[in-house]
Image (cartoon, rainbow, N blue to C red):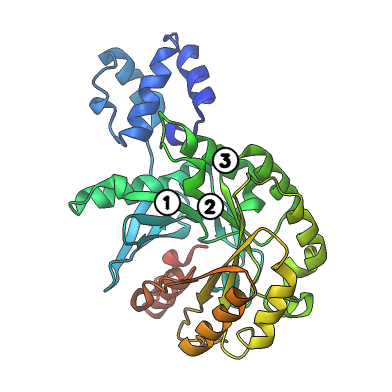
Amino acid sequence: MKNLCNMTFEELRDFVTGRGEPAYRAEQVWQWVWAKGVRSFEEMTNLAKDFRSDLAQVTEIRWPEVSEVLVSADTTVKFLLRLTDGALVEAVLIPGRTHTTLCLSTQVGCAMGCTFCSTGDMGFARNMTMAEILGQVLVARQHMKDTGRDAKEIKNLVFMGMGEPLLNLDELMRSLAVLNSESGLGFSQRRITVSTVGILKGLEVLGDSELAMLAVSLHAPTQELREQLMPTAAKAVPLDQLMAALDSYPLRPRQRITYEYIMLKGVNDRPEHAKGLVKLLGQRKAKVNLIAYNAGPDDLYQAPERMDILTFEKILLVKGLVATIRTSKGQDINAACGQLKADFIRRKLANRDPKDTNQ
């Protein structure tokens, strides 16, 4: 059966008219699926009963299945979601002072193999579909409703979960179109951020679309150190080529590119690294997001000292770089990318339940 969550509006309109219905019916169905988040055709009360019956026979509204939900002491919520083929992915609700941010995954696993990332340890299994990507938003909104909160509190979306978004470009762009649709999920371009290690073709497409803001996973001020931390990404697109591509990325007058910098104790958190970052980004329209590493039980790296983070930030600020420190959330529930799935698989293997180890 066709999943209505996996249709763009144009695809839905063609499907509806192909079944002999007027085109405006597509707008009605679209709003029920996305804006109202219904899961039953019987709830679509402005549709004729015969049409609802027809839809129920040939289509479905399928969301990812919630396999596990963990709530942190700081109210961060992490979902482990099971897809139709049994694959597991993660999504995270991150609380803020005035709104909530939802972190989304785009792939089952990841091919980049970054040495500090739990998802990279899993390897790559497959790309997620539009329905699976956007299903994370629907699940998170329903969770908010079920726990007595307003789903509209979710105001920011960040594609910073499992996978490299620009390596799933077609499904990403389909998803962004639905997110930007006023009658769909209704997020503005300014509220959506796509994070990438730097896939050149994807950067070109994303920039031309103007459907989302850009964040770049940098994590090192030099090619040598970046190769050590992110070997696949750094070798595929050397730092000088990446920066040249970003220099031509279309930005509005007051926009900046966000550069994410995960700080690893004794590895990239020293004053000389901060000075190298100033040299690299000082003349560019850049904002640096400093992120203290969220270490798991068996990780290669450790979290930096608080004083080292503050010293690093001060060097950037004194030299005129815009820099912020991202507060680490959900440390007590393995909220860093891939940690919950990895822990889930370890527990299932310990209990000898191999059906739950799908990648």
Q: Are marks 1 and 2 in contact (CB under 8 Å)?
A: yes
The circle on residue 57 is none
The circle on residue 211 is 3
Quarter of the image for residue 163 reads: bottom right
Distance of label 3 from label 1 (alpha carbons): 13 Å
Name the residue rendered at 34%, 59% in the picture: 67
| Amino acid at the residue labelled 1 | Asn
Precedes in sequence: disc 3 or disc 1: 1
Name the residue rendered at 78%, 79% in the picture: 224
Residue 189 pos. (x, y %)? 52, 42
The residue tagged 2 is 193
Distance of label 1 from label 2 (alpha carbons): 8 Å
The residue tagged 1 is 156
Residues 354 and 38: in front is 38
Distance of label 2 from label 3 (alpha carbons): 9 Å
Q: Are marks 2 and 3 in contact (CB under 8 Å)?
A: no
Q: Residues within 10 Å of mark 2 (few under 14, many from 20)?
A: some
Local secondary structure at mark 1: strand
Name the residue rendered at 26%, 15% in the picture: 49
Residue 157 pos. (x, y %)? 45, 51
